[in-house]
Image (cartoon, rainbow, N blue to C red):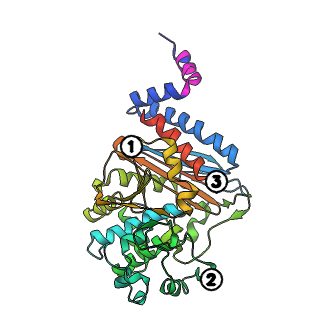
């Protein structure tokens, strides 16, 4: 029998295979699991940080209901403040999963129906293309070709309504997926209209507290600014997200690794939440249509599990975000299943985020960075960690 030192050396030599075996056998041993999860995460994260010049990253893993935190580098190069699990990061389009949950909560609470036409919820849109576009089509990017971003001339709260009133579809509603901030942004805006309160108020005073999230914000309070990481652009300039039309709904959430992994855990195990919120989460995990190997949920994007790295890379690729794709609607919609992988990326000019979880394995991973770096690199890091933990 090998001595403890020899066994440790063996793990160091054949790390990926040996760690996968150890994790599979001993995941219920908290001390051993933490030690080995850290080795797996270190191997994946440190290489990408160096290659991409990322100042700081926070990674959280939930495994069998227990969170594990791994922090790297600094929240700000100027003051060298280290990253912690409480550091606040911009999560960009990962915000859409919160917006989707709020909209689904409105349906579960009887305030709206996804089949409602947009102009029925907001009379100011009557007489426009939105007389025939449903809330579900807005929430799943199939309104008819709404663009990725608002045009500069319409990218403000006071001008966005006029933009929607004049907008003309490129495709018949429901036929093409065109990933779009204005699309899901309007979905969130209309959900709030149906509930009779401003979107920001509903998020901060209703949804986030019901999810048990205490350090997630649309506008970071002054008292929390010391925890707000400095973002860095691809050319290493300091930057933070600015205001824009429907920014809160589409890309405005700032959160920590500890809160975001709590949100992921709520998606894996929603049973302790109130019934309407459980129903809302199920609606966000429902598959509405497919494009290649990706099935579109509400906010979240779904894959049959197990899934290959190449499939995940394709689903999170630039063409998937920037180009229109014909869709194949699922009739009936695909009911939530544990045998799926659920994920979403998010970026602002100075931050990059990714969340992924597999309900059947009880595993979730969030990766937060204060630099915008390629989606493919985030997916590779998460896939490496997930592969080691799930074998």
Residue 248 in the image: x percent, y percent?
50, 72
User: In terms of secondary structure, where does tag 3 sit?
Assistant: loop
- The residue most toward the top is 1
**Quick one: label 1, few (<14), some, or many (20+) residues within 10 Å?**
some
Residue at 34 percent of width and 84 percent of height: 120
* Residue tagged 3: 373
Between residues 318 and 68, which one lies in front from this camera angle? 318
Up the image or down, 113 lies above or below 75; here it is below
Magenta span: 6-15
Residue 286 in the image: x percent, y percent?
33, 58
Mark 3–mark 1 distance (CA, rounded to whole Å): 26 Å
User: In terms of secondary structure, where does tag 2 sit?
Assistant: helix
Mark 2–mark 3 distance (CA, rounded to whole Å): 28 Å
* Residue tagged 1: 305
Indicate which label's residue lies in the foreground, 3 or 1: 1
Between residues 106 and 317, which one lies in front from this camera angle? 317
Quadrant, the C terminus: top left
**Residue 240 lies in what quarter of the image?**
bottom right
């Amino acid at each position: 029998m090998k001595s403890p030192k020899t066994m440790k050396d063996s793990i160091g030599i054949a790390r990926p295979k040996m760690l996968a075996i150890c994790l599979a056998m001993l995941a219920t041993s908290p001390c051993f699991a933490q030690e080995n999860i850290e080795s797996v995460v270190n191997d994946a994260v440190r290489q990408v940080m160096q290659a991409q010049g990322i100042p700081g990253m926070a990674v959280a893993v939930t495994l069998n209901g227990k969170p594990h935190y791994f922090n790297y580098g600094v929240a700000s190069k100027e003051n060298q403040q280290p990253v912690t699990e409480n550091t606040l990061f911009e999560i960009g389009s990962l915000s859409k999963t919160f917006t989707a949950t709020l909209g689904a909560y409105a349906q579960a609470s009887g305030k709206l129906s996804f089949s409602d036409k947009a102009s029925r919820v907001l009379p100011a849109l009557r007489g426009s293309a939105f007389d025939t576009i449903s809330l579900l089509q807005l929430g799943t990017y199939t309104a008819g070709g709404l663009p990725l971003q608002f045009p500069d001339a319409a990218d403000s709260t006071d001008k966005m309504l006029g933009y929607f009133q004049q907008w003309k579809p490129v495709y018949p509603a429901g036929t093409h997926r065109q990933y779009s901030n204005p699309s899901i942004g309007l979905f969130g805006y209309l959900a709030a209209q149906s509930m009779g309160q401003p979107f920001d108020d509903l998020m901060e005073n209703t949804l986030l507290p019901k999810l048990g999230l205490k350090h997630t914000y649309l506008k970071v309070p002054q008292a929390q600014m010391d925890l707000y990481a400095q973002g860095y652009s691809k050319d290493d300039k300091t930057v933070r997200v600015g205001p824009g039309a429907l920014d809160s709904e589409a890309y405005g959430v700032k959160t920590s690794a500890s809160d975001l992994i709590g949100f992921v855990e709520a998606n894996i195990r929603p049973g302790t939440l109130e019934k309407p919120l459980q129903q809302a989460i199920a609606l966000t995990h429902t598959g509405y249509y497919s494009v290649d190997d990706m099935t579109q949920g509400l906010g979240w994007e779904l894959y049959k599990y197990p899934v290959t790295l190449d499939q995940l890379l394709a689903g999170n690729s630039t063409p998937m975000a920037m180009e229109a794709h014909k869709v194949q609607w699922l009739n009936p919609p695909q009911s939530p299943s544990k045998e799926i992988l659920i994920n979403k990326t998010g970026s602002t000019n100075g931050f990059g985020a990714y969340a992924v979880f597999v309900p059947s394995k009880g595993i979730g991973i969030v990766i937060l960075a204060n630099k915008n770096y390629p989606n493919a690199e985030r997916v590779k890091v998460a896939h490496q960690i997930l592969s080691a933990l799930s074998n």
